[in-house]
Amino acid sequence: MSTTRRAFLQGMTATASTIAFSACSQEQGRNPTGLSETALAVEPIINPASLEKPNLTVGFVPVNDCAPFAIAWEKGFFRKYGLNVTLSREASWANSRDGIIFGRLDASPVVSGAVTNARIGAEGARQFPLCAAMTIHRHGNAITFNRKLWEAGISPLSTYSGDLDAFGRDLQQYWQTASIDDRVWATVLSSSIYEYFIRYLLSAAGINPVTELRSIITPPPQMVSNMRMDAIQAYMVAEPWNTRAIKGNEGVGFTFAQGREIWNGHPDRLLAVRESFIQDYPKTYRSLVKAMIEACRYCSEPANREEVAKIISQRSFTGANVKYTRPAIVGNYNYGGFDNQQRITNSLETTIFFEMPTSVSDIANDHSTFLWQSQSLWLMTQAARWGQIPEFPKNAEAIARQGWRTDLYREIAAEMGIVCPADDYKVEPASALVDRQSFDPSNPIGYLSNFAIRANAPKSFFFA
């Protein structure tokens, strides 16, 4: 290698390292510091001295679903359960996950799919025993399209009235004349539910995302700016970064669909820890889960949601204007568009923190923080579908049971007087999924084989 080329590469490496360190430092410089008067006034019901590790570092990412972490901090729920928590603002969902794996964080939210895929070693990654006993929230995310797609005649998913083929034709027609650079869509993490949603939607519309789309990973706060620069044409991310994009705000795009329109009732974030954390600090872990459950219940109350939207707009949390954080928290959600028409839906289902509306689940005692292990199996079917793992695991039920600790959640919830569903598995009805195909966890292989579009799907050859 020439001296000039070697010097150039060394310089690029140093620059990249400096940028990465700077980004990390900037995030750490915005961590919440100093408990509020409300938190300091809370009298602990658990003696910190009785816990194996009362001092914890807990991560969060600057999106709306940091709300339970912000509330547990501001309202003193961590303190109530004997914990002294340092909140660490993470730059991306990869940072949030890897902070647990490498021991920098004691606990942190991860995107659905991250726990089981870490245990399996999806996409060739080193296997690691992540665990989660609860969700942080359900829904609260969306897919944003840029203005070019709007001008090509594509409008929000609901306007197609379930005709996914029509959406597929509109998108393909645009792609026929558009540059290949107009097929770049972003998600927040590979091998995660957001990536699966993008692929699931496109394949249901008759488009093969493997061959027709370039998917890239982008941290949530960078989505809007990347769309403004025309580096990406669509993205899926948690709020407030969809609301921020619409006309009247940044004006770079419109919401094509909320994630709940792709899978109604899907789990978005899980509270993840290392398996060894549960084993080494069982009392501490129970305190942490109780504090987070209480925070989720607080966020769930309609009377509290305006306050929650304001708290998470603080610089230490999302740093976003409350006009961006409010719609998805309060449920007054605007899809936007570039024709001056109102597209507002009013529903607390936009983000679910604890109470589960019957339109989402009619199962007795179901609630948002409860983990259904069957939903972990659905995520594994998608990892297999897209070639991120060689095949659907033969021990999938064991992986779900070890990674999604529903058993432990039931014990902890019972200590709080919360009754849980008796089962770990449930059928996802056809009405819940965008392609109107139900998921029966007793037959995941049959479900997987129904998909004509998938990685390494059998091909037909015809000879003249």
Image: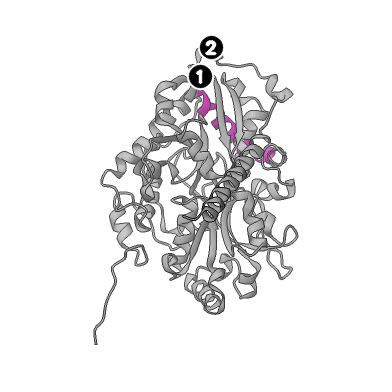
Magenta residues, dominant SS class: helix
Circle 2: residue type: Ala
Circle 1: residue type: Lys
Of residues 192 and 230, the one drawn nearer to the viewer in this rendering: 230
Q: Residue furthest front?
A: 3
Disc 2 vs disc 1: Cβ atoms closer than 8 Å? no
Image point (66%, 62%), residue name: 229
Q: Is mark 2 on a helix, strand or loop?
A: helix
Residue under numbered circle 2? 49
Image point (29%, 47%), residue name: 393
Query: In the displayed structure, does residue 379 sit left or right of residue 308?
Result: left
Residue under numbered circle 1? 53
The quadrant in which residue 27 appears is: top right
Of residues 283 and 118, the one drawn nearer to the viewer in this rendering: 118
Tell me residue 105's x, y (percent). 52, 31
Q: What stretch is highlighted in magenta?
A: 287-305
User: Is 182 placed above or below 112 here?
Assistant: below
Q: Is mark 1 on a helix, strand or loop?
A: loop
The quadrant in which residue 46 appears is: top right
Q: Is residue 346 magenta?
A: no
Tell me residue 276's x, y (percent). 40, 27
